[in-house]
Image: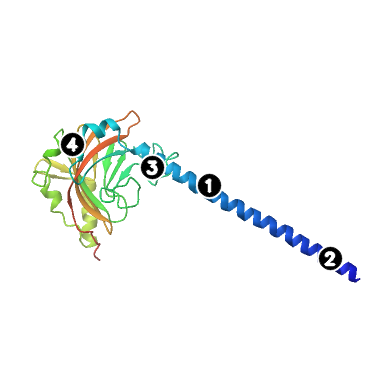
């Protein structure tokens, strides 16, 4: 009987060792896979940055302009074009001029979709575009006749006022012959002024110009910051 009991104990210990070793091997395998996936993700993110980077030709063409402070050159992918390829949130269709990123969810200011630009994407966020036509970006300053309406908008409004601004931006408002609205046609060799108000994130006034459209619809935009406002807070 003692020998039988001893055999059972020995078998149980052996089984525990084998199962424990298998569990340890599985844990090590999963740890290795996590590290490998993280490495692959970092490589993919690097490739995405290269994919969204402006062309060397455009960087050279606008080098003098880009030496000025608060300027930049970006690419926007038309929404949905590469959603199954790019892992970046928003698929490269958005940009934040305050945080300098294409990734959606960080106070994004502009979106490219169906050959239109839009602003105001989540919650109480809102804003306006106005299209100036084919005018040099250098000529657009705070003194430009199209800018005062956008520059004097009250961002920190009670929620009722914010909802009214959202409603107006959807339909558009006509002031001194210029239309201000949430969306505008995205056209090459056209210049725009944008006021983007993203609560708890940023509030910016930006001039942008479309300098290129690729065969896949991707657009390259030259931009300059006209003014940064205090971070807006939504009042009850």
| Above or below: residue 143 compared with residue 7 | above
Nearest-to-viewer mark from 3 and 1: 1
Residue tagged 2: 8
**Which residue is labeled 4 in the image?**
64
Residue corresponding to mark 3: 91
Q: Nearer the viewer, residue 195 or 126?
A: 195
Q: Quadrant of the C terminus?
A: bottom left
Taking the view exactly as shown, the residue that stands out farthest to the right is 1
Q: Dot 4, crowdedness within 10 Å: few (<14), some or many (≥20)?
A: few
Dots 3 and 4: beta carbons under 8 Å? no
Residue 231 pos. (x, y %): 23, 59
Q: Which of disc 4 and disc 3 is earlier in sequence?
A: 4
Asked if labels 2 and 3 touch by Cβ distance under 8 angstroms, the answer is no
Give the label on residue 36, or none.
Answer: 1
**Which circle's residue, 4 or 2, is located before the other in the chain?**
2
Q: Nearer the viewer, mark 3 or mark 4?
A: 4
**Between discs 3 and 1, the one toward the N terminus:** 1
Q: Quadrant of residue 182?
A: top left
Query: Residue 39, percent across and down?
Result: 49, 46
CA distance separating discs 4 and 1: 42 Å
- Please report whichever mark, 4 or 1, sits nearer to the chain's N-terminal start: 1
Name the front one of labels 4 and 2: 4
Q: Is residue 54 left or right of residue 191?
A: right
């Amino acid at each position: 009987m003692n020998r039988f009991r001893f055999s059972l104990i020995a078998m149980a210990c052996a089984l525990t060792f084998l199962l424990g070793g298998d569990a340890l091997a599985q844990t090590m395998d999963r740890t290795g896979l996590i590290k490998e996936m993280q490495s692959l993700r970092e490589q993919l993110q690097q490739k995405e940055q290269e994919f969204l980077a402006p062309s060397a030709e455009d960087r050279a063409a606008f080098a003098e302009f880009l030496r000025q402070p608060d300027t930049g050159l970006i690419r926007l992918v038309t929404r949905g074009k590469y959603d199954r390829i790019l892992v970046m949130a928003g698929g490269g269709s958005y940009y934040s001029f305050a945080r300098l990123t294409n990734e959606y969810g960080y106070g994004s200011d502009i979106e490219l979709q169906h050959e239109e630009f839009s602003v105001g994407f989540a919650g109480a966020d809102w804003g306006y575009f106005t299209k100036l036509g084919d005018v040099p970006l250098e000529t657009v300053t705070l003194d430009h006749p199209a800018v005062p309406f956008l520059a004097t908008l009250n961002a920190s409004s009670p929620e009722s006022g914010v909802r009214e601004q959202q409603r107006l931006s959807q339909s558009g408002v006509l002031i001194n012959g210029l239309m201000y609205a949430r969306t505008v046609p995205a056209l090459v060799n056209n210049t725009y002024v944008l006021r983007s108000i993203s609560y708890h994130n940023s509030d910016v006034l930006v001039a942008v110009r479309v300098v290129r459209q690729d065969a896949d619809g991707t657009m390259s935009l030259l931009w300059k910051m006209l003014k940064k406002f205090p971070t807006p807070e939504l009042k009850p």
